[in-house]
Amino acid sequence: MGVSHISDGPETWSRRGVLAVLWAVPAAVLTGCGSRAGASDATSAGAGTPTASAASAASTAEVSALTLTPADGSRNAGFTSPVQVTASSGTLSRVRVTADDGSALSGTFDDTRTTWTSDRNPCSGTAYTVTAEAEGATEETLFFSTEAAADTFVGRFTPEAGSTSGVGMPVSVTFTHAVTDRAAVEKAITVTADPQVEVVGHWFSDTRLDFRPEEYWAAGTKITLALRLRDVEGAAGVYGTQSKDVTFHIGREQISTVDLAKKTMTVRRDGRTLATYPVSGGDAEHTTWSGVMVISERFEKTRMESSTVGLGDEYDIDDVPHAQRLTTSGTFIHGNYWASSSIFGGSNTTHGCIGLRDAKGGGDTSEPGYAFYKSSMLGDVVVVKNSGEDTVDPANGLNGWNMSWSNWRAGSAF
C-alpha cells in the first residue's frame, strides 16, 4: 500500500533539518568566512623607528603609502577575490584585516614584502577594517565592505541535529538550487565518524548529495556533518550561505528481514533475534520492492489513499496505525486492522506495502504492528526478499545501500 498524502504525521525527513540550517550561525564561531582564527599580524625583523627624513615627509604630506584592493572606502565590493595590501614604497611591516564581527583574514607577504595577499576571499555582506604599516611610514587604517550575494542556496540535511538513528541512516543533503559545480560544493561538506571510517559522497541528482560508509555504521558511532557552504559558488552567480557543524549519533543495530515467500519478518538486534512476525506483502499485481530499505519516516497514525500513488480510488484509510516509510514512492511497513488475521503469514494481499496485524486505534500492545513500531527508530534497516519485484532504486528513499561500493564512489565529484 502506498501513500503520499500525510494528514497527521509528526514529522517528515524532507523537513527535518530545515530550521537547523536555513541560515548561517554567527560568523564569530565559524571557520572560513566568519572565523576568528588566522589573523595576520607579522612584524618585519628589520623594522625599526622611521628615519627622521621619513617622519618629516609623513608630517608634511598626506599621501598614503598603501594601496588596498578592494579600494579603500569601497562599498559593495566583490567577494570572489582575495584582499591585497601593497606598499607604494618600502616594505610592509604589519597587516591586519578584521571583519566587523571580530574575525580576521589570514594572509602572506610576497618575497619582496611589498604585497600582502589574504589566504582566502573576504566574506559576502561584511565590513572590514584594514590596519597596515609600511616601513618608514605611520600606520594607516583603511576600510571596505563587500556586497551581499544576490542569489543563494542552502543545504537541508537529514537526520536531525542531535538525533539518534539506526545503523542504516545515511547523511542526505538536499539543495534549494540546482548545483552545477559539484566538486566545489562537495568539497565544502565533510562527514566524519567516531570511531573513524571512510565516508564518501554520492550525487543522486543536482539537488541531492548523500554520504555513507562502505558498510552500515557501527552501533554507537558519533557522526559530524560540517557545512562550509558560505560563499561557495554552487552555480553561476548562486552562493551558499551556511557555515555550521552538526552532530548526531547511531544507536543500536536493528536489521529486519522480510521474506515474502515465507510471509514472515525476522527482527535482529545487535546480532540476536528479537522477534519473528507474520506479515503480508504485495500481491501479484502490486509487488513489493525488494532490496535494502531504510526507515525514513514514522507515524503512529496516518492517512493512506490510493489516488496519491496512481491507484485511483481503490482505498482511502484515514487511521493506518504504526506506519513507517521505506520509499519516497510510497512503500511503508505498517499495522493493518481491516484485513482478516488469516492473511498475515498466509498470503500476500497488499498494494505493495508490508502489513502486520494490528488493532484499530493502534492501542493494543500485544499486536505485532504495535510491537514492531515501538522497537524501531529512524534509520533502521528493513531487507525485503522473495517479493517478485526488482530491487528498489537507491534514490527512492534513503536506500543507497543497494548500490555497490565501487558504484557509490563513482558518484562522488572527486
Image: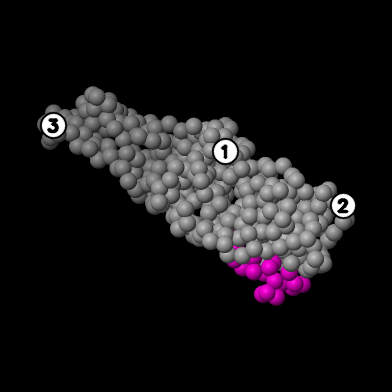
Name the front one of labels 1 and 2: 1
Horizontal arrangement in the rendering, residue 310 relative to residue 66 (left or right): right
Q: Is 35 contained in the magenta span?
A: no
Q: Label 1 to label 2, Cα distance in Å?
A: 36 Å
Q: Position of residue 89 (x, y in %)?
A: 24, 25
Look at mark 2 in the image and give the residue it sits on: 312
Amino acid type, label 2: Gly
**Considering only order in the chain, which callout, 3 or 1, is on the residue closer to the N terminus?**
3
The Cα atoms of the two marked residues, 2 and 3, are separated by 84 Å
Foreground residue among 195 and 345: 345
Q: Nearer the viewer, mark 2 or mark 3?
A: 2
- Sequence-wise first label, 2 or 3: 3
Residue type, numbered disc 3 = Gly
**Could you say which disc has been placed on residue 46 in the image?**
3
Side (left or right) of 148 relative to 81: right
- Quarter of the image for residue 126 reads top left
Pointers 2 and 3 in contact (C-beta within 8 Å): no
Q: Main secondary structure of the magenta part?
A: loop
At 51% from the left edge and 46% from the top edge, which residue is drawn?
215
The residue shown at (50%, 43%) is: 214
Locate residue 136: give its quadrant: top left
Q: Magenta region: which residues? A: 358-378
Q: Name the residue type under label 1.
A: Ser
Going 39% across and 32% down the picture, which residue do you hit?
82
Measured Cα–Cα span from mark 1 to mark 3: 61 Å
Q: Residues within 10 Å of mark 2 (few under 14, many from 20)?
A: few
Which residue is under mark 1?
404
173 and 3: which is toward the camera: 3
